[in-house]
Image (cartoon, rainbow, N blue to C red):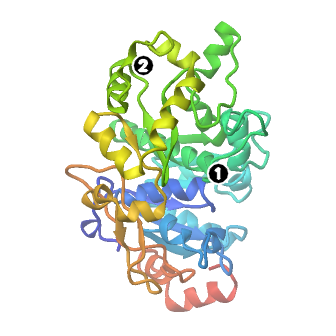
């Protein structure tokens, strides 16, 4: 597992020590591991990362995804002996990743200023709710709070009720993705200069980064975006429509595409109707236009509408859930979901490594290991040189 030649991807010469738990930090580590990095995940002994028991359905399976390709060790970071183990790991690492509340690592003697004394070139990736500085930095911060502060939560849901949320931890995964992006940029800088640095990725700013033009629109026009449910204001037609046996998404808001939709519906005159003849008026008459389209789609099945839209070159598609993903030929052709055998599940399926790379594609080498501290002997013994007696003593003292 430690041999770079046995790993695939563009980061096979990179070692990352992953501290922290739950989603925002570990997802960044997953991205790195997927790209071939040697990720050593450090968990507290006797309990591990709470993600080990997270998930829905009858079994906690999220861990299999978020801890895949990682070597898992245990270390009690609240004890000096555990801190010393981590320092030894960091001394020969390229990056260290953490998502504790700011100030926590400093209290444990593992802050950046301490770590650069033993590894001046280390890149420290810090993921938090509010960032490492500012008046809110020491507050506890989860994805939901960052999504609210970053502006996303206000825009989610129907306009006649309280803001909703996506059924996923978008704030966490956005912060992790931006953290990974920053870490790779820092790695490029280090390759040129030899200098390490801190990557400070907050959840709220990660959400803010994808908020399009909400800030300048307000500053210039005093315009505040509001919730719009399943549609985007002034963009029509682009909605979910009823069919005789289900629902279907059609996005035909461009003039030429809308014309093709009208012809397919057998109502070509709609394209020149003064209510729908261009992008602006279609947006103003969205409700009326959606009603006309819905009257047509409900007379046909999803399969019929799908075929007609593809023949006409109109962007459209089914609303996918897990069953549809597993059955879809495009998913299958691109190997987007792969079998990843585990001890418990011989054909466990999960999303593949992404993005795709033409020369240095990563792969899933193993899923998240179920045994807590599964790689203690391999890492602490094989790489740090600790004897069996030393490992036994550390375990007896609840250090590992």
Contact, CB < 8 Å: mark 2 with mark 1?
no
Where is residue 84? Give x, y as percent. 61, 68
| Residue that label 2 marks | 270
Left or right: where does residue 7 sit relative to residue 234? left
Q: Front-most of 253 and 77?
A: 253
Quadrant (top left, top right, bottom left, bottom right) of the N terminus: bottom left
Q: Nearer the viewer, residue 398 or 264?
A: 264
Disc 2/disc 1 C-alpha distance (Å)? 64 Å
The residue under the point 49% across, 44% down is: 298
Q: Residue at x 42, y 51 (%)?
A: 301
Q: Which numbered mark, 2 or 1, is in the foreground of this view?
A: 2
Q: Secondary structure at mark 2?
A: helix
Q: Percent x, y for residue 287?
A: 60, 26
Residue 387: % across, % down: 49, 87
Direction from residue 14 to residue 375 in the image, left or right: right
For this rendering, which residue is in front, 15 or 50?
A: 50
Please report whichever mark, 2 or 1, sits nearer to the chain's N-terminal start.
Answer: 1
For the C terminus, the image quarter is bottom right
- Vertical side of 290 occupied by 162: above or below: below
- The answer to whether residue 239 is seen in the rendering is no
Structural crowding at the residue carrying mark 2, measured as other residues with C-alpha within 10 Å and reported as few (<14), some (14–19) or many (≥20): some
Q: Is residue 327 above or below residue 297?
A: below
- The residue at 51%/41% (across/down) is 241
Coordinates of residue 289 in the picture (x, y in percent): 52, 25
SS of the residue under disc 1: loop
* Label annotation for residue 82: none
Q: Which residue is mark 1?
A: 111
The answer, for residue 124, to whether it is visible in the render is yes
Q: Please rate how many residues cluster around mark 1, counting C-alpha atoms within 10 Å: few if below 14, some from 14 to 19, many from 20.
A: some
């Amino acid at each position: 597992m430690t041999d770079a030649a046995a790993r695939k991807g563009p980061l096979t010469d990179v070692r990352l020590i992953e501290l922290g738990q739950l989603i925002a930090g570990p997802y960044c580590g997953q991205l790195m591991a997927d790209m071939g990095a040697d990720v050593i995940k450090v968990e507290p002994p006797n309990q591990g990362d709470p993600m080990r028991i997270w998930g829905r359905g009858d079994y906690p399976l999220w861990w299999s995804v978020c801890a895949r390709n990682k070597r898992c060790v245990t270390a009690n970071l609240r004890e000096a002996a555990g801190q010393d183990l981590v320092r030894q790991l960091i001394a020969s690492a390229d990056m260290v990743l953490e998502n504790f509340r700011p100030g926590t690592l400093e209290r444990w003697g593992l802050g950046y200023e301490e770590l650069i004394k033993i590894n001046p070139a280390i890149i420290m990736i810090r993921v938090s709710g509010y960032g490492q500085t500012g008046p809110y930095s020491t507050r506890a911060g989860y994805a939901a709070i960052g999504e609210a502060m970053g502006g996303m939560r206000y825009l989610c849901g129907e306009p006649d009720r309280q803001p909703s949320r996506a059924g996923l931890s978008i704030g966490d995964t956005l912060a992790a993705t931006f953290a990974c992006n920053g870490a790779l940029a820092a790695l490029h800088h280090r390759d040129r200069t030899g200098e390490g640095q801190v990557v400070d990725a907050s959840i709220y700013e990660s959400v803010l980064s994808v908020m399009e033009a909400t800030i300048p629109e307000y500053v210039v026009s005093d315009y505040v975006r509001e919730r719009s449910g399943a549609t985007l204001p002034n963009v029509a037609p682009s909605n979910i429509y009823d069919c005789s046996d289900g629902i279907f998404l059609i996005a035909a808001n461009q003039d030429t595409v809308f014309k093709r939709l009208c012809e397919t519906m057998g109502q070509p005159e709609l394209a020149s109707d003064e209510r729908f003849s261009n992008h602006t008026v279609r947006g103003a008459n969205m409700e009326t236009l959606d009603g006309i389209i819905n009257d047509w789609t409900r007379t046909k099945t999803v399969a019929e509408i799908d075929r007609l839209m593809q023949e006409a070159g109109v962007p459209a598609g089914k609303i996918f859930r897990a069953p549809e993903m597993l059955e879809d030929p495009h998913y299958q052709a691109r190997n987007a979901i792969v079998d990843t055998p585990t001890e418990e599940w011989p054909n466990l399926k999960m999303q593949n490594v992404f993005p795709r790379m033409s020369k240095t594609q990563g792969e899933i080498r193993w899923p998240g290991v179920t045994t807590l501290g599964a790689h203690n002997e391999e890492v602490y013994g094989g790489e740090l040189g600790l004897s069996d007696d030393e490992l036994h003593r550390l375990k007896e003292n609840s250090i590992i």
